[in-house]
Image: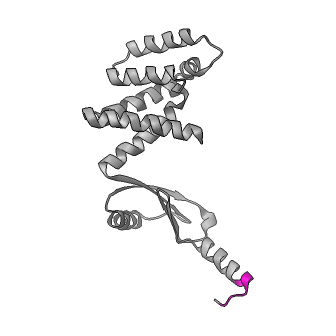
Amino acid sequence: MKNLTISRRYAKALMLISREDGNTDQYQTELESVIGLFDAQKDFENALTNPLYNKNERKKVLTSVLAATKLSAVMKSFLVLLFDKGRIGFLRDIASYYRDLADELKGVVKARVISATALSSGAIGKIKKALSKKFGKNIVLDVEQDPSLIGGIVTKVGDLVLDGCVKTQLMNLKETLKKGESV
């Protein structure tokens, strides 16, 4: 839980800087490129985060790699700050939170739709349109399948869950019958 709080704090700080200088998209792209570098070179990420290596040597590795990149001065300073504060290992979470903040700034909301069967493109379009109307924002849908739902869909938008699946309705009916209430 503490890691999430730390990651959010750094993402918000970078977002404040980006709003001042107008480089929100650039910083998002740069964060993603550093994450891509971490993905491609696991040894590089390990060299930066492993406390068994000398901290000064790890910082030299970071600064020499940053010098060879075309990252902005703000991003280079941000990454060095993360390293100095022992937070470079949180970079993936920071990038994820930053992406969410950038989307929010653009009026984009991510939603997840889980259905029992594959949805047609028409159905997906209707769901997207209805959610856009309900929230007054542009919706980006992530559609998944889960046959255990039996039928219907579950929609998750942030912390809000709209559960219209048959499985939940049957479970609610079962609970009602257990309590001896009339249906």
Q: Position of residue 174 (x, y in %)?
A: 69, 79
27 lies above or below 55: below
Q: Position of residue 175 (x, y in %)?
A: 69, 78
Residue visible at 44% across and 23% down in the picture: 79
The reply, left or right, for residue 22 in relation to residue 156 is: left
- How has the structure been colored for display? one colour
Residue visible at 33% across and 20% down in the picture: 73
Q: Position of residue 44 (x, y in %)?
A: 54, 19
Q: Nearer the viewer, residue 143 or 117?
A: 143
**Which residue range is magenta in the image?**
177-182
Indicate whether residue 179 is drawn in magenta: yes
In the rendered image, which quarter contains the N terminus? top right
The reply, left or right, for residue 125 in relation to residue 154 is: left
Q: Nearer the viewer, residue 117 or 103?
A: 103
Residue visible at 49% across and 31% down in the picture: 91
The reply, left or right, for residue 64 in relation to residue 53 is: left
